[in-house]
């Protein structure tokens, strides 16, 4: 599965600090999947920057007109 592959999997995400000074991204998905991902604060800031950049790129892509279908 790639970044552009659609999925019907539902998941919940929680983000917050741990009591050990890490930032945890906790993902819980259907089928009992639990995925705790811990990052140091610097890594978490890098992830936040990547999320902002991806959001801006998606916003720009969403503003573009759809390509016209090719005639055969």
Image (cartoon, rainbow, N blue to C red):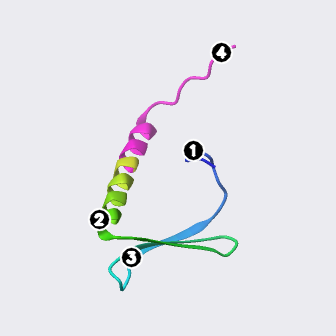
The residue labelled by disc 4 is: 71
**What residue is drawn where x is 34% and y is 70%?**
40
State the quadrant of the C terminus: top right
Q: Position of residue 8 (x, y in %)?
A: 67, 57
**What residue is drawn where x is 39% and y is 42%?**
57
Report the side of 6 relative to 52 (left or right): right
Helix, strand or loop for disc 2: helix
Magenta region, residue range:
55-72
Q: Do residues under tags 3 and 4 come within 8 Å of each other at their CB atoms? A: no
Q: Do residues under tags 4 and 1 come within 8 Å of each other at their CB atoms? A: no
Helix, strand or loop for disc 1: loop
The residue labelled by disc 1 is: 4
Residue at mark 4 to residue at mark 2: CA–CA distance: 51 Å
Residue at mark 3 to residue at mark 4: CA–CA distance: 51 Å
Q: Is residue 44 shown above or below 58? A: below
Neighbourhood count class around disc 4 (C-alpha, 10 Å): few under 14, some 14–19, many 20 upward: few
Neighbourhood count class around disc 1 (C-alpha, 10 Å): few under 14, some 14–19, many 20 upward: few
Residue at mark 4 to residue at mark 1: CA–CA distance: 25 Å
The residue labelled by disc 3 is: 16
Depth check, mark 3 against mark 2: the one in front is: 2
Helix, strand or loop for disc 4: loop
Q: Do residues under tags 4 and 2 come within 8 Å of each other at their CB atoms? A: no
The tag earlier along the polypeptide, 3 or 1, is: 1
Neighbourhood count class around disc 2 (C-alpha, 10 Å): few under 14, some 14–19, many 20 upward: few
Q: Is residue 1 shown above or below 72? A: below
Depth check, mark 2 against mark 1: the one in front is: 2
Residue 61 included in the magenta stretch of the image:
yes
Depth check, mark 4 against mark 1: the one in front is: 1
Say which of 39 and 27 sits in front: 39
């Amino acid at each position: 599965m790639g970044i552009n592959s659609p999925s019907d999997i539902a998941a919940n995400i929680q983000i917050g600090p741990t009591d050990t000074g890490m930032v945890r991204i906790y993902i819980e998905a259907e089928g009992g999947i639990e995925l705790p991902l811990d990052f140091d604060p610097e890594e978490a800031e890098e992830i936040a920057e990547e999320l902002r950049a991806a959001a801006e790129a998606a916003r720009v892509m969403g503003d573009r007109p759809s390509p016209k279908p090719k005639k055969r």
